[in-house]
Amino acid sequence: MEPNIVLIGFMGTGKSVAGRRLARRLNRDFIDMDQEIEKFLGMSISEVFARFGEVRFRSEEHLMVRRLAEMENKVISTGGGVVLNPENMKLLRKNGIIVALTADPEVVFRRVSGNRRRPLLARADLETVRERMESRATYYRDADIVVDSSEGPPEDTVEEILRALRKYRKTGNGDKR
Ligand code: S3P
């Protein structure tokens, strides 16, 4: 049985893009948690926030974590807020290696601005992005492997994840910045 590889990180750190490529490289199935929630509820994440609010979204997110944590051998990219519920992380860790993606606030801001898919950053300026990232930083640091995705194309991020995973498997220690 192979553990899941679970990507966590703030919005705009490239979890979905890197996750999809990583899965291809490892010949595993890729699961995007937000997309699974959207499929399950039949509406977009923005719609869930607008119609039912964040509390409801978090509860749907938790239910999805419970389902996905039962799986094995997958690459799973999570929504940026999954770390806020310690129970989520406990479940995902049980059968998963946790890989956090980080990026500079300026890079995140550039990636997410003008993208209406993210209700929590709909009107955020750079300062707001910086504050939100800072308030979550300790959650993301608490991963087995931490990789910065600020520079270079997604392939570089994936290479770095693969390298850190090999090291982690050998030594029980990944790369942490
Ligand atoms: C959220 C991140 C989003 C999505 C929702 C809430 C967050 O996912 O789950 O909008 O609280 O950070 P991405 O990280 O894929 O943008």
Image (cartoon, helix red, strand yellow):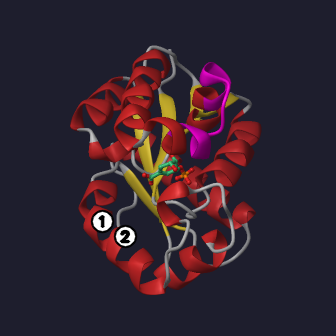
Position in image of residue 3 (x %, y %): 47, 25
Q: Secondary structure at mark 1?
A: helix
Is-magenta flag for residue 54?
no
Q: Which residue is mark 2?
A: 133
Position in image of residue 132 (x %, y %): 35, 69
Q: Which mark is residue 14?
A: none
Labels 1 and 2 touching (C-beta < 8 A):
yes
Secondary structure mostly seen in the magenta stretch:
helix
Instruction: Residue at the far front: name it.
Output: 51
Viewer-nearest residue: 172 or 80? 80
Q: Residue at x 51, y 65 (%)?
A: 121
Q: Nearer the viewer, mark 1 or mark 2?
A: 2
Position in image of residue 92 (x %, y %): 37, 30
Question: Start and end of the magenta stretch?
Answer: 38-48
Q: Which mark is residue 137?
A: 1
Answer left or right for 36 relative to 133: right
Gap between marks 1 and 2, in whole Å? 6 Å
Q: Residue at x 24, y 30 (%)?
A: 87
Q: Secondary structure at mark 2?
A: helix
On the rendered image, what quadrant is the C terminus found in?
Answer: bottom left
Q: Is residue 98 visible to us here?
A: yes
Q: Amino acid at mark 2?
A: Met
Viewer-nearest residue: 170 or 37? 37
User: How many numbered badges does the structure rendering display?
Assistant: 2
Answer left or right for 72 relative to 94: right
Disc 2 crowd, CA 10 A, few/some/many (<14, 14-19, 20+): many
Disc 1 crowd, CA 10 A, few/some/many (<14, 14-19, 20+): some
Q: Amino acid at mark 1?
A: Ala
Viewer-nearest residue: 42 or 129? 42
Q: Residue at x 63, y 63 (%)?
A: 157
Residue 139 placement: quadrant? bottom left
